[in-house]
Image: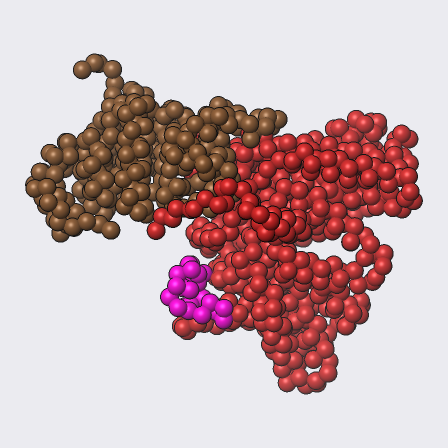
Chain colours: A brown, B red
């Protein structure tokens, strides 16, 4: 192990609303190229945790460091500039622009051309936008209005947009929510492949345990704001505490047999 | 002391009417999300009908019955308007309803003159409240005391209506989430209609109750609508209590402003509104507005730069326009210059409104500032025309930089209202700072230099500048900055997540739009040879909005077409008929109902339909669309 700081280091992250401790002393780290799943039942503090990582929410205490550099207290746009791409639980795209233009906006921002009033935007990084779209399998949709896309395609577009600044870290909030089962597998396989190729660290939250156990290198489990388990999919699956938390939801594998699947 | 108490009571009495009208507007907006510009018109019709009825029928019953009957009659008109007009445009692009209700207002202004004549009408006193009450040597009309009592009574009745009836519960629910109410099986159509009727009833009642205090005249709609907007915004859209408190606040500010700050009395109210909006953007009693759900299926054609054929066509149109002096007389050339100037004004607002999604209700402020800038430079510094034309718009630029900084912190209706407030502040300064601006008399004698003095030369100048400005803004739309601006309009969340500083981008757009409007204003000052406070008034701001909406807010070239059609039609109608507002208003309403995408939007739709009916179009359209669920 080298002494270089990990890609993402989270230390003692804490946030409370009124008297409720949404997140309490959560610490974990993430290496480049690693795919880490953040799971937990509803209300466990996943979203709060996530929002503190991407700058939407400020922790009461604790630190988030990207390659040793502090990100806590920074605005989302500044965190993006440090090399963090993200996708949303409910997709956020530029609905009146074409698919290619959506990617071009991110590329324009990355190239610090936002206040360029004379250039011709349709020609800015056209090739690069096309490559990113090809990468996520959306090459044929480049000229479509974004508002016309099916939901699964919007998710893929978001991935392409998130990759536009050559990120070191991808934050994906429920990347497969609202997708058909086949699409979920495809999207996660694609994400994993890109992450390995480009050595991007991926942190994602997810409700679908099929997706989690199949694609995560490592899993961390939150319950009532605290970290209760961390380890490989096999370790987490076998963890009695995790099973207790999830008991009744019927989402976990038991001894390799599925008890039930979410729709 | 007694004098101040009386002044305070007079303020309270004025608050009653204002509250009635404002609560109506607030209720309508809360449920239907329509900013009903025609609300002032309903107020005015209420006053006129009440005047007729109370003149016709004598006695106490005649008066009070007449007031009530007038309000009910106007409510009925409101129902008709809702069913015939508004129902068709609830799903039109945002602010399009504003255009429709504005068209109505125009029509009503001419209609009341047609029916009741242009003179002020003084109504009779209210039976039982004819005298005055002596208060330490000061007289208070007893009718004022009646109105003071009426305000809280109406507030109480509305409170009961909203808290204790099933209808009230539905209205409150719809104010919070109308989609959910519809999903629960409530007949939304009739809920909307009834809400509109109640709102209009309140407006008309407010108007009818004014007749013993004020003369009825055909411009009372615009005066009240601006005040009512202010009240509703200060109180918080959708809040009845807020409307009451704000109505009292605004009326008292008016009553005491005259005494304490006579120089800035008009500004006072707008200053308060601006401060409230900056500190509490959703008003004193309002709640932050939940983001409205986007109407599904409303996809916009992606914008693209002109093809080379379209560029040739535009060039040809420009050449034809440039040849106008060869066959047109001086009058036509002056009209042509004015249209060219308004094209500049419209494209500048379009940049902010269509590209940036920021609909300014006070864009004339920057047009007027440009005009005043030129007037100051030409009259006071005696600078030559070219220098004035280059430096004058900087005043618009500065105004936009200052006001825009605050305005872009808000969005939607609140942005619109804050820009309106700023424009009114600038207007008040121009109106009241007589020693510098000449006040109502304006600044005269701003004549062009000899090289631009002849109508044809000035026309070429205006046309050339208009073409340059239009091209420059078009380039900006398709520049990286234009993309960033559209990105902030489409999704703040996503733009922030790709590193865009949305406020800074929007502020920059505001300054660009303001400066461009200032260029138009600078030319306008030379065209008219004078500058007046009207050059930055509300009606000019509304003109700009109408031009953009008329052309098609979702198109790139709509503003140009909208400006030409609106301005030409306007000038032509004024020269042809005394009922120009009626015709123009009718035309606007027709456009809204029949072509809700504006003129250019409609043309694009037609072109697209033709393309689709011809042999299989682009290969993309033929591709099967994978659906998610």
Q: Give percent across and percent down for residue A225.
A: 20, 40
Q: Is B85 in the magenta?
A: no
Residue positioned 59% across, 33% down in the render:
B478
Residue positioned 14% across, 44% down in the render:
A252
Figure quadrant of residue B573: bottom right
Q: Is residue B342 above or below residue B24?
A: above
Q: Give percent across and percent down for residue A173.
A: 31, 39
Q: Work out which residue is located at the far front of the displayed protein and give it.
A: B615
Magenta region, mostly helix, strand or loop?
helix
Nearer to us in this view, B93 or B131 = B93
Nearer to us in this view, B158 or B362 = B362
Residue positioned 62% across, 50% down in the render:
B610
Report the quarter where the N terminus of chain B lies: bottom right
Nearer to us in this view, B114 or B462 = B462
Q: Is residue B138 above or below residue B531?
A: below
Magenta segment: B169-191
Q: Is residue A99 left or right of residue B86?
A: left
The answer to whether one can see residue B205 in this image is no
Q: Is residue B86 left or right of residue A163?
A: right
Residue positioned 20% across, 42% down in the render:
A209
Q: Give percent across and percent down for residue A13.
A: 24, 32
Figure quadrant of residue A8: top left
Q: Give percent across and percent down for residue B130.
A: 68, 77
């Amino acid at each position: 192990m080298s002494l270089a700081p990990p890609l993402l280091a989270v230390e003692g992250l804490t946030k409370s609303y009124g008297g409720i401790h949404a997140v309490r002393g959560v610490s974990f780290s993430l290496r480049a190229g690693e795919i880490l799943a953040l799971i937990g039942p509803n209300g466990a503090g996943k979203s709060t945790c996530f929002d503190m990582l991407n700058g939407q929410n400020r922790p009461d205490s604790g630190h988030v460091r990207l390659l040793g550099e502090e990100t806590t207290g920074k605005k989302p746009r500044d965190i993006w500039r440090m090399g963090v791409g993200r996708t949303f639980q409910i997709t956020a795209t530029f609905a009146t622009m074409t698919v290619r233009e959506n990617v071009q906006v991110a590329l324009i921002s990355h190239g610090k051309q936002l206040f360029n009033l004379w250039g011709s935007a349709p020609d800015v990084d056209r090739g690069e936008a096309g490559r990113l779209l090809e990468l996520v399998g959306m090459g044929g949709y480049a000229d479509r209005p974004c508002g016309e896309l099916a939901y699964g395609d919007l998710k893929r577009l978001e991935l392409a947009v998130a990759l536009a600044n050559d990120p070191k870290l991808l934050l994906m909030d429920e990347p497969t929510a609202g997708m058909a089962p086949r699409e979920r597998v495809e999207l996660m396989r694609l994400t994993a492949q890109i992450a390995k190729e480009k050595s991007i660290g991926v942190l994602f939250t997810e409700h679908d345990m099929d997706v989690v156990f199949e694609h995560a290198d490592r899993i961390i489990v939150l319950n009532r704001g605290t970290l209760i388990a961390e380890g490989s999919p096999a370790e987490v699956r076998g963890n009695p505490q995790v099973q207790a938390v999830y008991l009744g939801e019927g989402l976990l594998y038991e001894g390799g047999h599925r008890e039930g699947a979410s729709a | 002391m007694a004098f101040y108490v009386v002044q305070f009571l007079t303020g309270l009495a004025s608050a009653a009417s204002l509250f009635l009208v404002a609560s109506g507007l607030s209720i309508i907006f809360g449920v239907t999300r329509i900013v009903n510009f025609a609300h002032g018109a309903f107020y005015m019709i209420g006053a006129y009908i009440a005047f007729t009825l109370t003149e016709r029928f004598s006695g106490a019953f005649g008066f009070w019955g007449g007031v009530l009957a007038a309000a009910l009659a106007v409510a009925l008109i409101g129902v008709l308007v809702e069913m015939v007009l508004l129902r068709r445009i609830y799903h039109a692009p945002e602010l399009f309803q504003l255009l429709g209700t504005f068209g109505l207002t125009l029509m009503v202004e001419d209609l009341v003159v047609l029916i009741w004549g242009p003179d002020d009408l003084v109504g009779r006193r209210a039976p039982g409240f004819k005298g005055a009450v002596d208060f330490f040597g000061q007289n208070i009309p007893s009718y004022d005391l009646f109105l003071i009592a009426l305000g809280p009574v109406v507030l109480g009745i509305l409170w009961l209506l909203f808290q204790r009836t099933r209808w009230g519960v539905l209205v409150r629910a719809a104010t919070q989430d109308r989609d959910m109410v519809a999903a629960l099986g409530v007949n939304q159509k009739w809920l909307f209609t009834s809400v509109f009727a109640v709102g209009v009833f309140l407006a008309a009642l407010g108007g009818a109750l004014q007749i013993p205090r004020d003369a009825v005249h055909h411009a009372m709609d615009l005066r009240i609508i601006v005040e009512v907007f202010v009240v509703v915004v200060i109180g918080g859209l959708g809040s009845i209590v807020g409307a009451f408190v704000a109505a009292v606040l605004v009326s008292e500010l008016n009553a005491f402003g005259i005494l304490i700050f006579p120089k800035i009395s008009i500004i006072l109210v707008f200053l308060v509104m601006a401060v409230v909006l900056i500190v509490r953007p959703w008003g004193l009693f309002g709640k932050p507005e939940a983001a409205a759900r986007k109407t599904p299926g409303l996809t916009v054609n992606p914008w693209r730069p002109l093809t080379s054929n379209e560029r040739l066509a535009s060039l040809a149109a420009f050449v034809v326009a440039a040849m106008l002096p060869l066959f047109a007389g001086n009058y036509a050339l002056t009209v042509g210059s004015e249209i060219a100037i308004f094209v500049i004004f419209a494209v500048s607002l379009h940049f902010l409104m269509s590209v940036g999604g920021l609909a300014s209700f006070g864009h004339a402020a920057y047009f007027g500032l440009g005009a005043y800038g030129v007037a100051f430079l030409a009259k006071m510094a005696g600078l030559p025309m070219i220098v004035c034309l280059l430096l004058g718009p900087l005043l618009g630029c500065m105004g936009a930089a200052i006001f825009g900084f605050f305005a872009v912190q808000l969005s939607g209706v609140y942005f619109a209202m804050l820009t309106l407030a700023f424009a009114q502040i600038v207007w008040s300064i121009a109106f009241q700072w007589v020693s510098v601006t000449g006040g109502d008399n304006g600044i005269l004698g701003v004549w062009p230099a000899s090289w631009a003095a002849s109508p044809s030369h000035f026309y070429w100048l205006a046309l050339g500048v208009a073409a340059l400005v239009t091209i420059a803004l078009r380039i900006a739309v398709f520049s990286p900055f234009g993309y960033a601006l559209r990105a902030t309009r489409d999704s703040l969340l996503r733009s922030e997540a790709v590193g865009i500083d949305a406020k800074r981008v929007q502020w920059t757009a505001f300054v660009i739009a303001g400066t461009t409007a200032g260029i138009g204003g600078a030319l306008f000052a030379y065209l008219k040879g004078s500058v007046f406070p009207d050059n930055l008034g509300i009606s000019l701001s509304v003109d700009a909005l109408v031009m953009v909406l008329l052309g098609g807010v979702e198109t790139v070239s709509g503003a140009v077409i909208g400006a030409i059609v609106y301005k030409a039609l306007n000038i032509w109608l004024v020269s042809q008929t005394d009922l120009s507002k009626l015709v123009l208003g009718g035309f606007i309403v027709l456009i809204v109902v029949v072509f809700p995408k504006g003129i250019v939007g409609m043309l694009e739709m037609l072109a697209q339909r033709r393309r689709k009916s011809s042999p299989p179009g682009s290969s993309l359209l033929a591709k099967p669309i994978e659906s998610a669920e």
